[in-house]
């Protein structure tokens, strides 16, 4: 059972809590009432605000729409005004640009092109919007005038600043001194850089907007003229300097050290002599008739040398200048027109060079018809240079017309054909040179025909490949019985190997030597004295052999005829033996034939004494006669001369000594000094004076 006090306390606690709860409840009710009142007030305010917003919206939206329409109208007005200003500007373009267009683009190309652009836009506007307006005709006329003045400026700049390249620069450009290891390429500046940029700019405009290719014709005509003038200037430079030979190695002395010029191609120093001597052949001709006197003066030879060197340099100059022109052209002319324009540009200069080459061939052909074979020596250096230059020619002329590319090969073929003809006819002329007594050397020395033929052959050494190619170009293998290698069986002469050409040249030289030997044998018959005949043949054979040995001719001939050296030695020895037979009429008196046997001190019969006297007299007279005659003969080769003398001294001296010993104790005369005129030593001295006109 719960105590009473505790129950009372508990009751009071509950009553207090109940009272607090009732108070809280009353507070919540009051709060809810206030909240309801506030909510009703807020709803009333919001309703009022919403009403006002609706009223405001109904008032503002029409205003906004009106404002937006006004702004759009304003923008349209602005755009319209701007368009009107732009359109109106087209109507004023002709007037605004009139002064600049009339004055032309000189000195203010950028400003001028800007005016042309405005005019062009005006033309496009009127064509699109008002094609029937008079303003279109006005701006069109102004545009055409502007284009015309641009084309005129293009021509003017080209003609004003295009100059021929000075000869000294061309010589520097086509090559430097061979002794200088490092040689910088010489750049040819055809136009000043500022002018070039203006020309490029005008060209680009004319291509893009001018729609006219006439300026390309102007370009190739102007540059073609300058290219031709540059080459002609170089040729004139050679001619002007011919008197002092300034173009040969001293052109090189006159040239600047900092930009060395090119040495001319080496030409053998004996070519001129060979030309002179060969022209003497033409006085005889193949038919034995004397031709015109073609022996040239020295001055003419100098002029010929200058012409040859000039042509060779002009060929190289053309290649270098054409390459330079193409490099310039690629900056100015549109790509798809470059090859055609370049082809047109080089035609005049190329045609002039080819015409000059054709003239050389024609002159050579006429000379060969007169049996003047020196012409081939003129062709050799030119032909060699043309063939060396041909690869550069081919590269330079890539993309040009076939007719342009074929011009140089056609010239080379012509030169090879006429050269081969000259070589063949020269070989025939050696064989058929007439035997004329007045033309034979009285002293039996080397014949002019021999020295000239060897001289001519020596020139071939400097042009072995060229001469071999000449022969190969005519497919002369059958003529010389040269077997063709399977690799050389092509019908094209250019396909022959260098080795085959070398064999052809070797056989050709051997043929000339054979013809020469045959002709010399025939000429020797003119001499009545067999000994002089032998000396003549000996001298000529010895000269041929020594000349072959001193040059590379012996190696060249040995390519196809390895025994040529031994053959000539045999011929030389054979002629020495033939010469020595002339002394038999001297030494035959020293033999014991017809001398009767006798003892020393025995008295001889008159007949026996006369036999000995006749032997002495025959020896003395024969010795004196031979020494007198043969002293005037010639053996130019000292080694051979000494050898012949020595051999003859040995034979004659030994026979004479033996004869004197045999007759030493024989009393065949009261005046022995009358018959015993010479001692063996004196005989040797007399023989030592053979072949010596000064003795």
Image (tube, rainbow, N blue to C red):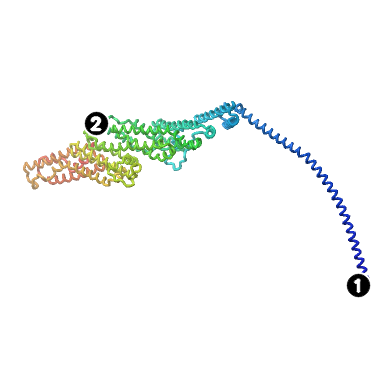
Is 243 left, or right, of 688 in this rendering? right
Q: Label 1: state its secondary structure.
A: loop
User: Mark number for residue 546?
Assistant: none
Q: Nearer the viewer, residue 412 or 363?
A: 412
Taking the image as shown, residue 295 lies to the left or right of residue 576, namely right
Q: Is residue 175 visible?
A: no
Q: CA distance from mark 2 to mark 1?
A: 185 Å
Dot placed on the residue nearer the N-terminal end, 2 or 1: 1
Q: Which mark is residue 2?
A: 1
Residue 337 in picture, x, y percent from top left: 48, 36
- Identify the residue at image location x=65%, y=32%: 83
- The circle on residue 289 is 2
Taking the spot 34% from the left edge, 34% from the top edge, the residue there is 361
In front: label 2 or label 1: 1
Q: How many marks?
A: 2
Q: Nearer the viewer, residue 405 or 418?
A: 405
Image quadrant where residue 512 sits = top left
Viewport quadrant of the C terminus: top left
Of residues 585 and 37, the one nearer the viewer is 37
Q: Quadrant of residue 225?
A: top left
**Res. 614 in view:** yes
Q: Secondary structure at mark 2?
A: loop
- Badge 2 crowding class, 10 Å Cα cut-off, few under 14, some 14 to 19, many 20 or more, is few
- Cβ atoms at labels 2 and 1 below 8 Å apart: no
Residue 224: x percent and y percent?
A: 45, 32
Residue 253 drawn at (x, y percent):
42, 36
Quadrant containing the N terminus is bottom right
Q: Against 36, is 205 above or below?
A: above
Residue found at the far bottom of this picture = 1
């Amino acid at each position: 059972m719960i105590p009473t006090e505790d129950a009372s306390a508990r009751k009071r606690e509950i009553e207090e809590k109940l009272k607090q709860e009732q108070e809280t409840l009353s507070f919540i009710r009051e709060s809810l009432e206030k909240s309801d009142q506030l909510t009703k007030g807020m709803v009333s305010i919001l309703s009022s605000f919403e009403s006002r917003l609706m009223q405001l919206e109904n008032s503002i939206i029409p205003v906004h729409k009106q404002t937006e329409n006004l702004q759009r109208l304003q923008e349209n007005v602005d755009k319209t005004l701007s368009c009107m200003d732009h359109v109106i500007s087209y109507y004023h373009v002709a007037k605004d640009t009139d002064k600049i267009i009339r004055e032309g683009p000189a000195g203010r190309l950028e400003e001028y092109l800007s005016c042309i652009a405005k005019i062009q836009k005006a033309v496009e506007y009127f064509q699109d919007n008002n094609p029937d307006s008079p303003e279109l005709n006005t701006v069109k006329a102004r545009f055409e005038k502007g284009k015309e003045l641009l084309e005129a400026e293009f021509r003017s700049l080209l003609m004003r600043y295009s100059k021929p390249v000075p000869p000294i620069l061309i010589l520097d450009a086509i090559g430097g001194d061979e002794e200088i290891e490092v040689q910088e390429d010489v750049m040819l500046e055809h136009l000043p850089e500022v002018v070039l940029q203006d020309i490029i700019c005008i060209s680009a405009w004319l291509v893009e907007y001018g729609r006219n290719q006439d300026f390309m014709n102007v370009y190739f005509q102007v540059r073609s003229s300058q290219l031709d003038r540059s080459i002609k200037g170089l040729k004139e430079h050679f001619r002007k300097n011919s008197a002092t030979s300034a173009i040969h190695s001293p052109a090189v002395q006159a040239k600047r050290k900092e930009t060395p010029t090119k040495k001319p191609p080496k030409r053998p120093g004996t070519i001129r002599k060979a030309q002179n001597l060969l022209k003497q052949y033409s006085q005889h001709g193949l038919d034995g008739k004397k031709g015109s006197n073609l022996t040239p003066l020295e001055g003419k030879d100098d002029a010929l040398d200058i012409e040859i060197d000039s042509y060779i340099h002009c060929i190289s100059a053309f290649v270098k200048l054409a390459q330079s022109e193409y490099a310039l052209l690629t900056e100015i002319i549109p790509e798809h027109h470059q090859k055609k324009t370049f082809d047109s540009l080089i035609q005049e200069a190329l045609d002039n060079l080819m015409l000059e080459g054709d003239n050389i061939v024609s002159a050579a052909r006429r000379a060969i018809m007169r049996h003047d074979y020196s012409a081939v020596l003129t062709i050799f250096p030119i032909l060699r240079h043309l063939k060396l230059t041909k690869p550069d020619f081919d590269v330079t002329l890539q993309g040009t017309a076939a007719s342009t590319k074929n011009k140089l090969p056609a010239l080379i073929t012509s030169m090879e054909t006429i050269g081969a003809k000259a070589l063949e006819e020269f070989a025939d002329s050696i064989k058929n040179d007439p035997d004329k007594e007045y033309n034979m050397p009285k002293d039996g020395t080397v014949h002019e025909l021999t020295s000239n033929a060897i001289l001519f052959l020596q020139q071939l050494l400097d042009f072995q490949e060229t001469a071999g190619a000449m022969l190969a170009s005519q497919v002369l293998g059958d003529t010389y019985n040269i077997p063709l290698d399977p690799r050389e069986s092509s019908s094209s002469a250019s396909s022959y190997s260098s080795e085959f050409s070398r064999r052809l040249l070797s056989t050709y030289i051997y043929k000339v030597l054979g013809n020469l030997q045959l002709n010399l044998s025939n000429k020797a018959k003119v001499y009545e004295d067999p000994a002089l005949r032998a000396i003549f043949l000996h001298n000529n054979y010895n000269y041929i052999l020594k000349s072959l040995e001193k040059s590379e001719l012996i190696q060249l001939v040995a390519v196809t005829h390895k025994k040529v050296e031994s053959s000539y030695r045999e011929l030389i020895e054979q002629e020495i033996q033939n010469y020595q037979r002339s002394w038999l009429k001297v030494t035959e008196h020293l033999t014991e034939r017809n001398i009767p046997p006798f003892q020393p001190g025995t008295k001889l019969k008159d007949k026996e004494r006369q036999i000995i006297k006749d032997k002495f007299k025959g020896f003395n007279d024969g010795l004196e006669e031979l020494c007198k005659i043969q002293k005037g003969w010639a053996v130019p080769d000292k080694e051979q001369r000494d050898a012949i003398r020595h051999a003859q001294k040995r034979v004659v001296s030994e026979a004479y000594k033996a004869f004197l010993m045999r007759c030493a104790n024989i009393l065949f005369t009261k005046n022995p000094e009358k018959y015993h005129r010479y001692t063996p030593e004196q005989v040797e001295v007399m023989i030592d004076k053979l072949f010596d006109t000064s003795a």
